[in-house]
Amino acid sequence: MAMLVTGAAGFIGSHLVDRLLDAGRRVVGVDDLSRGSEGNLAKAFLNPRFRFVRVNLADFRQVESRLPPAIAAVDEPCDAVWHLAANSDIAAGVADPRIDLRDTFMTTFNLLEIMPVLGCRRMLFASTSAVYGERAGPLTEDAGPLLPISQYGAMKLASEAAISAACEAQLERAWICRFPNVVGPRSTHGILFDLLEKLSRDPETLEVLGDGRQRKPYLHVFELLDAMLFIWSRAPEKRAVYNIGPEDGGVEVADIVQTVIESTGRPTRIRYAGGDRGWIGDVPRFLYSVDKLAGLGWRPMGDSANAIRRSVAELRAGRGAA
């Protein structure tokens, strides 16, 4: 059966497309290419089981005119929607709240409306640890109340609620995966991408947002995909909600900065911008529980520090760095 992947040309979405195709699935990839890149799908385009559709999911006219023909052309029933399309720039959503309303919530709302037309009754949703807000941890999936401090987290939480409600109407199953900070090849934002970008412009001085004491969990994208596919195949609940992440307490920004600088082999002066967080809506220290996922039978192979080191090497290789 066919899988529909939204945000297919993005960082995580493109890796998911590759993984599903490698598993023998037929995949319909959907993206508006506002943040993703067709280059991320270079391998997928060589596969006859892949079909790409350029659609702005926030525009329902495009959704209803382009998605049904794309699914019909596949000649296989739509097994599930893997919904990864969303605004990924938290700071941008603070500056303009309509960005997350449009690109995070309305994409979800419109997908839920079109899914009965597609004959598809199952959805896996890429949510986020940002739904918890700024709270002491470790936080479990049933922690409450959920009070996000960013528009990004708020619209992800609103999407979770809309998906839950849809389970009483048109959806048969829903899997909600709350992501940590994800790193790895093809990333176009996040701390590693930003630090390497700054160093490419000025290798002598590196300005770092905050005071360097922010601490968060990090997971490599390939391990994230392992966890998502495991949850998809094993979680028994009609509405399955799982935190995905490493089992350690995360790493501090100052340690990440040192790892990035050491990878270049050049002396660099560090200048911290100050304050306890990088931007409005940033949760400076975060820890949630992954015990529920471990109880299901999945545990990560590496920790946050390992994910950072691996990703720095991959990103530098992708840039052609020595």
Image (tube, grey):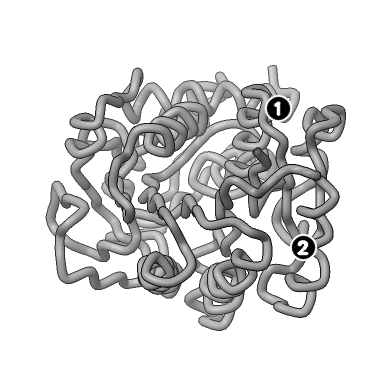
Query: Who's the residue at 81% across and 58% down the image?
Result: 54
Does the rendering let one see residue 281? no
Question: Which residue is at 43% across, 72% downward?
Answer: 169
Residue type at mark 1 is: Gly
Residue ID at (64%, 70%): 114
Q: Tag 1: Cα neighbours inside 10 Å, few (<14), some, or many (≥20)?
A: few
Q: Nearer the viewer, mark 1 or mark 2?
A: 2
Residue 143 in view of the camera:
yes
Residue bearing the label numbered 2: 68
Total marks in image: 2
Q: Nearer the viewer, residue 17 or 164?
A: 164
User: Residue at coordinates 49% horizontally, 45% vertically from top-left?
Assistant: 191
> Is 94 drawn above or below residue 4 in the view shown?
below
Left or right, 284 with reference to 150: left
Q: Residues within 10 Å of mark 2 (few under 14, many from 20)?
A: some
Q: Nearer the viewer, residue 55 or 81?
A: 81
How far separated are the C-alphas under marks 1 and 2? 36 Å
Secondary structure under badge 2? helix
Pointer 1 or 2: first along the chain? 2
Q: Above or below — where is 221 with respect to 11?
A: above
